[in-house]
Each structure stands twice: as C-alpha cells, then as structure tokens.
Amino acid sequence: MSVLVVGSLALDTIETPFGAVDNALGGSATYIAAAASYFVVPIRLVGVVGGDFPKQGISFLKGRNIDLEGLQVVEDGKTFRWSGKYHYDLNVRDTIFTDVNVFEKFNPIIPEKYRKSKCVCLGNIDPGLQSKVLDQMHNPRVIICDTMNYWIERKNKELRETLKSIKVLILNDSEARLLSKEPNLITAGKVIRAMGPSVVIIKKGEHGALLLTEQMIFSAPAYPMENISDPTGAGDAFAGGFVGWLARTDDLSEENLKRAVIYGSTLASFCVEKFGVDGLADLTYLQIQDRFREFRELSRFEEGD
Amino acid sequence: MSVLVVGSLALDTIETPFGAVDNALGGSATYIAAAASYFVVPIRLVGVVGGDFPKQGISFLKGRNIDLEGLQVVEDGKTFRWSGKYHYDLNVRDTIFTDVNVFEKFNPIIPEKYRKSKCVCLGNIDPGLQSKVLDQMHNPRVIICDTMNYWIERKNKELRETLKSIKVLILNDSEARLLSKEPNLITAGKVIRAMGPSVVIIKKGEHGALLLTEQMIFSAPAYPMENISDPTGAGDAFAGGFVGWLARTDDLSEENLKRAVIYGSTLASFCVEKFGVDGLADLTYLQIQDRFREFRELSRFEEGD
C-alpha cells in the first residue's frame, strides 16, 4: 500500500543524562516516515519547515527515499523548535521550550498524486488539521492516527470528530486514561473504540504495548533496554514501524496487526538507542528481522505437564 | 517437592470501590499456601495467630489441605490485623491501620517433619525471621522469598543477608528500584541478582511480570481484567502459584520457570476477582489450565512474510 505521512518536522534541542544535541532533526513526520521507509518506499510526506531547515535534514529524508513533494518550505519563516530535558529516570522529561514558528499557520495541502494513498498516517498534530487531511483523501484503506494529552485537553471536540473517521488510534497509557476517563486500560480501550477507531493501541513505554480490537487483546512485551540514549521519537518510530509493516504486507488481519505492533516496537527500540533520528539512519532489514525474532523469544512459553 | 510456607496470617479490613469486608482471613502465608495448594498437597505452613482467630479461618486452611502443625496459636493474644482502602484507581491504596499483635513476638519454629521440605517459600516478613527459618532447614532445593519496601528501608542489612541464601526473589517494580537504586528494571534485576538470588521476578501489576536469570529475560503479560474486586493478596497468590507449579513439576529449568511465572499470574488473576481469599477458595485445576492457555493466546504472535 502507498503511504502518506502528515505531521511535524522540527529542530530539537535535547538533553539526557547521556548526552545532548542542539537543533537536531526531529518532528513526528520525520520519525514516522523514517521508520516506515524500512518497509515500503517511497513514503509520501506532508509538512512544513522554515527557510532555516538544514540541508542535512533534506538529505536525510531523501536518503530514506521519502517523497518530499508535499513538504512546504516557508522561506522567510523559522522551523518548529522543541527543547526537552530527560531526567535520570528517562520516564520523566521537562519541556524547556516549544516554538511553533511556521507550524502555527500550517495548512496541510495534499498534492494530487498523494490523494489516492491507501494508507494514511496522521502524526501528532492538531486534530483539526488531521481532519483537513482526511477531507482531501480519496478513499484510503486504512487511517492511523496519533495524538497527545495537549489535544485531548484543548481540542477534545475536534479530536472526537477526527476519531470518527479513523481505523487505528495509537496513544500512550496516560493519554488513554485521559481520553476515556477510565483508570483501567482494558476498559479505556473499549471506551475509545466506541469513539470510532476499531483498533486501539496503547503504548506503555518500558511495559510494552496493548493492541485492542473487538475480538482480541494482544499484549506486546517491551524490548529489554539498559542503554537508552534518547527517548525522543520512540512513539513516532513505533507508529512508523506499525504503518510500514501494514503497508508492506497489505494485510489488515488481526494476526498481522499483532506483527505490526511488534515491528512498531522494534523500530522504537532502535530509535532510542541513539540520539535524535540517528537510530533510524542506517538499519538493515536483516537487523529489523533479527530484533523481531528477539521479541518473540522474549514472550514465548510452552505448555508443560 | 514438599513445600513449606512461612509468613503472616491476618484478619484484614478492606474497602475498595466495589465493596468492603471486616476482619476477613488474610496474611501472606494464607494467600501463598492457598494458591500453592492447587498444585501440590499438603502445603506445610508456619505462622502465628491469636486466640481470636476464627474457626472458619482454620476450616478454610484445612479445606485447602494445608498442614497446620506449624501454626502457633497464642491463646491470650490477638491476631495480626491490617486495614486498607483502595482508590478508584486500584493501583493506589491507603493503609488505615496495622496492628501487629501476636506477630510482634513471632518466633518461627519449624516442626521437625517440615525441616526436610525441598521447597521453602518465605512470605513477606522481617528478613531476620526469614533467615531464622532457613537456619532450621535441612538442605532445601529451592528457596523463594518475597519482601517489601518496609524491609528494604528499615532492615536493609538483614535483608541483604537473607538474599545471599535464596534462589528466587519476588518483588514488585517499585521495590526493585528501591533495593537496587536503579530506575531501569533490567539493570535493577542484574544488580539484585548480584546480591544473591540467581532468579529475580519483578511484578508490575497491570503490566505483567519480568523473569530475569543470567541467561534469559522473559516478559509475562498481565491478564486483561476489567473487574477487579480486591487487589489484596495478588502478590502472595502469584508467589503461591509460582511455588506450587515448581513443586508439582520438580523442574527448575528456565523453560519451567517461565511456566511457573504464568501459573503465578494465573492464580493472582483469580485472587483479585473476589474479596479476600474467596478468589482462591474453590477453583478447579481445569479452570487454572484454561486461564494458563488464555495467557499464551494473549502474547502469542507468529512470524509473517
């Protein structure tokens, strides 16, 4: 399936206990597209950057075979910037600043040749913009959407409207609880499914992920990691791996959704091993397959007696 | 393998959003022995109660084929009492009161015929008492130990001494972080293994459990539960199911340790479905086997492509 990714492109300034980077390539669309590009090419990208967006950023995306026809460049504007600092416990982070810049007036215009994309992945942006994207599409087979606390709290009505049109919602555990107003994650998944998406994926960081459909609950383990360099982009890399696998296989069966969750977890695990997008820069398909098998080993057990 | 369980017997007053009980049968030894009794009988129990311990408590334990020769009854004393209140989010609980009563002077005397037990399960009690138990045993094949924040903080030296003698330590994620002073659970497991136990099991509540040995990491899913009546005793039921399976199979291989973790999770899931020990009162081995298979289905996925 052809894949369209819409989201942010950013310059991130990140500090973790293990290092720091200034103005490194980031943004939800960047991570999603880079992760998905290991499964199908080209990935079609729609987003916006300023005139200050570095040439190396463009080279990275082109090097990953990402189609940039939909990338808007506002020559006299500045690229979205985000800065965050992670604590020793990497589950905790402070946002130092967010400069929306050119993203504030972002109007996602989908190029004509992108409009028949069979698979649409909406990165974590304003749900109003997500709906605007969907309005321009011609009958996609599967729509996958990410969101976050900020939109759940500030654009709840718009988000609920977007949710009516999508098939797969990916969010983390605290977001699932916030959106559903349910502490129990299984119940939260049901409540969210009743809002529209027939498939809900709840990411639980170091505890893995849950995949919930009408018929099935699948519990994916987390990859055991001791050396996380930078957690930035893990959620987007997950979405990219998930979308990429579905697009590559053109198979939306429950068995294949499970595999897609493991491929999502696989790409997220590679992502956090290095700073910024470096973890997604030069993997091989063999490396990805090997880690997929490690995931299977991690949760496999046989009946005894 | 013959099984000895040492721990507390208590009368619990519990309130959850779904009900309340006064002076219900509880305590770590009660839950561990009841859960283990579905796998091997008799389970040998050592603990202490007061003259106020209800006849129904004794009947329950005898009904589960638990050998009470090691149960000390202090006729003029009162049984250990605990009261807790769970919040709507069942992960949060307040302790209302703890009356140690006869437990304060508990001296675990192991009856002669118990001393050759091959499998020893030390419930969550003072690590000094745990060591006292081990001093009386004749060469057990496997020693399993539970502990909690309270002992990690207040009896750290004694706990570290006990840990040198045991094979399997079971604790929850916050306890693992506290004991190891490591936020990363995989690293925490390694640090704790270096303290003595060659096998560490980290329980993560709604996120399942991790089993860590020198060679292997196994990630067990949590049973998806929407209707938890009362979380009390879940950790002890886990220990009991784990110990019971090992004792039944007499097999300490890594493959069988994985199964034991799933049987532990199975018994914990039954435990929390009802109040107090009611969830462990009348299961069948078939029910247990069915739920074991549900666990397998929950985390099973096959390679595609």
Image (tube, coloured by chain):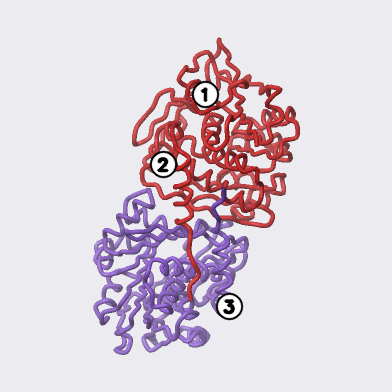
Chain colours: A red, B purple
- Disc 3 to disc 2, C-alpha distance: 43 Å
**Structural distance between the alpha carbons of marks 1 and 3:** 58 Å
Question: Does A47 sit left or right of A83 as displayed?
Answer: right
Specify whether disc 3 shares its chain with disc 2.
no
**Marks 1 & 2 on one chain:** yes
Residue at image mark 2: A90
**The residue marked by circle 1 belongs to what chain?**
A
Residue positioned 59% across, 69% down in the render: B273
Residue under label 3, please give it: B286
Q: Is residue B227 left or right of residue A97?
A: right
Instruction: Residue A179: name its quadrant.
Output: top right
Total of numbered circles in the picture? Answer: 3
Q: Are marks 1 and 2 in contact (CB under 8 Å)?
A: no
> Label 3 crowding class (10 Å Cα cut-off): few <14, some 14-19, many 20+?
few
Q: Are marks 1 and 3 in contact (CB under 8 Å)?
A: no
- The kind of residue on which mark 2 rests is Leu
